[in-house]
Amino acid sequence: MYSKRQIIIQDMIKGFHVDALFITNFYNILYFTGFRTLVPHEREAFLLVTKKNAYIFSDGRYERHTPSPSQEGNFKLLTPEKGLMKHLQEIIAEEKIVKMGFEREDLKWSEYNTFQKSLGVELIPQDRVGVKIRAVKDAQEIAKIKKACEVGDECLRDISKTLREGSSEKEVAWNIEKWIRDKGYEIAFDPIVAVDANSAVPHYDTKNGNSHVKSNSIILIDMGVRYDGYNSDITRMFFMGKQPDEVIGAYETLLSAQTKTIRYLSKDHKLADVDKYCRQLITDNRLPTYPHSTGHGVGLEVHENPKVSGTSEETFQSGNIITIEPGIYLPGKWGMRIEDTVAITSNKQVKVLTAYPKLLQVL
Amino acid sequence: MYSKRQIIIQDMIKGFHVDALFITNFYNILYFTGFRTLVPHEREAFLLVTKKNAYIFSDGRYERHTPSPSQEGNFKLLTPEKGLMKHLQEIIAEEKIVKMGFEREDLKWSEYNTFQKSLGVELIPQDRVGVKIRAVKDAQEIAKIKKACEVGDECLRDISKTLREGSSEKEVAWNIEKWIRDKGYEIAFDPIVAVDANSAVPHYDTKNGNSHVKSNSIILIDMGVRYDGYNSDITRMFFMGKQPDEVIGAYETLLSAQTKTIRYLSKDHKLADVDKYCRQLITDNRLPTYPHSTGHGVGLEVHENPKVSGTSEETFQSGNIITIEPGIYLPGKWGMRIEDTVAITSNKQVKVLTAYPKLLQVL
């Protein structure tokens, strides 16, 4: 358990009026304790924080992981003979726990059901535990994301020089990944490389795609780097040869909307307003709005809070790191998106962390 | 929706005595419909199967995915104005749905809660939907896993030639991944390469490790290939130079236990018995038992049903594909594991799909 974050979570417990908080979300466990199992979507570890203690539960495969020295002694080994329920029953009795909070968006129905039958405590659903606190990054976290953004910029610089007629989407995506990993970093997500009509599919599945760059192609590259657990996210467009006026005009509109929206962040802190502002700049030019939000938080997860969307009820806070990524999509023809990772620093100042050029580039 | 599998799911609905079944599990949606969103652990799509119809719900990013032609017309677009609840309410009214099944191990507490408040149907938890049916593979699925195993064998043959003093674990793991992906396949999971004392950690985290091969090292490699969505899983040991008798003796015990257990599969079909049988062969030789199950099902997921463990209450069925992977671990010293992917074919015949040699190899 990170000592600073242990204080945060103990404060949460007080605020929730519970005696303990049970954490199942992989990224929350990582955030609070540094403990990391191999597969995020498999339930390989659990965290229980009480008023005095913190316990990590995992099986023998992870017994010799050492998350942090202060964690030692609170590792509870799950075995076929002594599973999670037995451990929890013991701790509940020892520490006289009556009310136990849980993550309402993460606990499965079956887990809740088993707890209800076996634990004899009052289970109190908690809304978006970790989500709010993780949305506000500290200086160390911002530095890691900044570094991830810089590596991404450098990668795009090198990869852009390799784009040529005949390159397949898959090959470019794989070259991006190799570039990042050969240098000892990780990818934040499978890079999206979408050529021509495929660029109109906002979440194009490059791994299952089959297109090649042509002499007059439009190429969308959406990629990110993970550095020490923290992610970056950037999208850039590349144009092979001269493009029709329609494409150039749309790109200019998009670029202007994206940069204006980034500037707008320091003026209006309501996320829903930012989303509306950005869309308006595009639809005012008689171009279609985009079927996704204007942006999202970035951190231990590529998509985290806050969400820059029309349904968001939040305002920005200093320490937020978000993307601004409007797009223009003409299904069957072409699509484009420009995305930067942006930090809201102290006093709600805005700092763009991704620096790869955005001016229309013809290769 | 795959027509054959639509019949299976309609039969399930009858068996569950419900009017509809709501599916959230990424791999179940993929299995039944072929529809695949980009990030397995983010909720990007949902499936509702009624007595007559099947509906996929996803947002605008996936509107132009085409899972299979027969799916067309049943794609329901999720927008900020018309979200999942509104779509479900409409279908529930139209098709007069009273009882709706859901996956008890997959639905989140918050999702269940929203359904209860908004849908006005009786929600019926269903146990391990898809898990049982997916555990029995058809001929096409077996062929895909067999192919994935063959690619894995070939990869190990090439990689084994590159192992030498000074190689880092990370570098070997990355070479395995590059080998697989350069040939156009995917990795089933991040390869585990664990040297010497690290090999005693059953789920060693190679990406965060830092060891190198020495002149007398023990090297554990646990890797798998994904071919057309289906996975393989294999673990082999490599020995640099002559090993102490203790190590050789343990390896011989392990190899004998692993191969005997594979033969035993055709004699006893209770999974718990197989687990017990394998452990006994190791502990009879005064070596420690292993802190994980003897094996697991392999398919669209690397870890799926059935589980070959002491707590399992199931028996094998023809069409199961499982791993047999006992290990011997001496924490702080060394560890070893031998793992094959094995198919239980018609009439419960046993066929080993991974063919890379298991005899003690000194490099």
Image (cartoon, coloured by chain):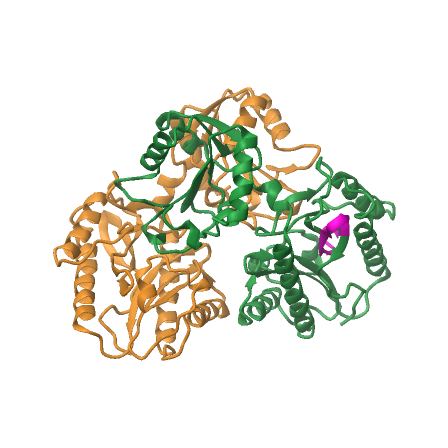
Chain colours: A green, B orange
- Can residue A61 be seen at all in this image of the molecule? yes
Nearer to the camera, A79 or B3: A79
Q: Residue B209 placed where, x, y %?
A: 43, 65
Nearer to the camera, B239 or B297: B239
Q: Residue B262 placed where, x, y %?
A: 21, 56
- Decide whether residue B126 is among the magenta residues: no
Is residue A41 shown above or below B257? above
Q: Residue B206 placed where, x, y %?
A: 42, 64
- Decide whether residue A346 is among the magenta residues: yes
Q: Quadrant of the C terminus of chain A?
A: bottom right
Q: Quadrant of residue A171?
A: bottom right
The secondary structure that most of the magenta stretch takes on is strand
Q: Which residues are magenta?
A: A327-349
- Can residue B40 be seen at all in this image of the molecule? no
Q: At 86% from the left edge and 47% from the top edge, which residue is drawn?
A: A286
Is residue A312 shown above or below A228? above
Is residue A60 shown above or below B85? below
In the image, taking residue B101 as reference, residue A244 lies left or right, namely: right
In the image, taking residue B223 as reference, residue A313 lies left or right, namely: right
Q: Residue A169 placed where, x, y %?
A: 62, 64
